[in-house]
Image: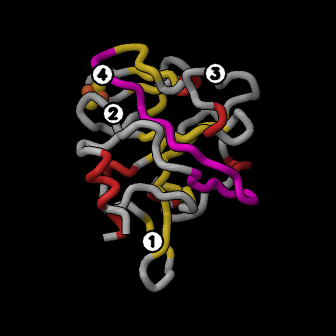
Amino acid sequence: TRDKMPPVPGDILVHASASKEGQPIKISELSEQLVRAWPMGKDKEGKNLIRKGDPNNVLAVFRFPQGQLVPPTNLEATISGEIVAYSDVCTHAGCSVSDDDQQEGQMKCPCHSGQYDPKRGCKVIGGPPPRPLAQLPIKQEGEQLVVAEFFLANPYPFTEAEWEARIE
Ligand code: FES
């Protein structure tokens, strides 16, 4: 069903936090603090549908000052080299990754202390995760963030062919 579909081009990123769930994320409210997001598309009747039927769809969005996002981040898949989105599902055992309380602008997994650097393509900088978090290409439409393409790497515990088969 469409709520289990992976994000597809044209989906809008909306807040995942309980207090703002479903509200479109605005560019102006982003900062170096992680904002957790879901992709939102349309159901068959054309109504808004948050794709939270698969917990692996959860995303992390950041805005860094110009010049701080560097490769291996794919800068073409960011908004103005400042705003970037990643899968928020730890590549070790699937926990939701948070801000690192000790190191501003970095991410830490609460389960086994995996660490990622979101300014450098979410590469692993500590702990057991085997791979970086997958980057999701996004673009700007007005004040909103919109999915531009599929993930640049497969963040799901199933093959790319299987997640493509989920797209209706
Ligand atoms: Fe994230 Fe183990 S699940 S470090």
Q: Do the residues labelled 2 and 1 touch (CB within 8 Å)?
A: no
Estimate the x, y position of residue 69 in percent, counting from the top left: 65, 25
Q: Which residue lies furthest to the top in this view?
A: 126
Where residue 134 sits, quadrant-wise, is top left
What residue is rendered at 59% in x and 31% in y? 74
> What crowding class fits label 1: few (fewer than 14 Cα within 10 Å), some (14-19), or many (20 or more)?
some
- The magenta segment: 127-148
Quarter containing the N terminus: bottom left
In the rendered structure, find residue 130 and report the number of the disc placed on it: 4
Task: Please tell me whether residue 10 belongs to the stretch shown in magenta.
Answer: no
Quarter containing the C terminus: bottom left
The three-letter code of the residue at mark 4 reads Pro
- Residue at the spot of label 1: 49
Q: Looking at the image, is mark 4 or mark 1 earlier in the sequence?
A: 1
Image height of 35 relative to 119, above or below: below
C-alpha separation, residue under disc 2 versus residue under disc 3: 21 Å
Asked whether mark 2 and ligand 1 are closer than 8 Å, the reply comes as yes
Q: Nearer the viewer, mark 2 or mark 3?
A: 3
Residue nearest the observer in this picture, 58 or 10: 10
Task: Please tell me whether residue 137 belongs to the stretch shown in magenta.
Answer: yes
- Residue at the spot of label 2: 90
Image height of 80 relative to 54, above or below: above
Q: Can residue 167 be seen in this view?
A: yes
> What crowding class fits label 3: few (fewer than 14 Cα within 10 Å), some (14-19), or many (20 or more)?
some
What residue is rendered at 26% in x and 28% in y? 92
The three-letter code of the residue at mark 1 reads Leu
Asked whether mark 1 and ligand 1 are closer than 8 Å, the reply comes as no
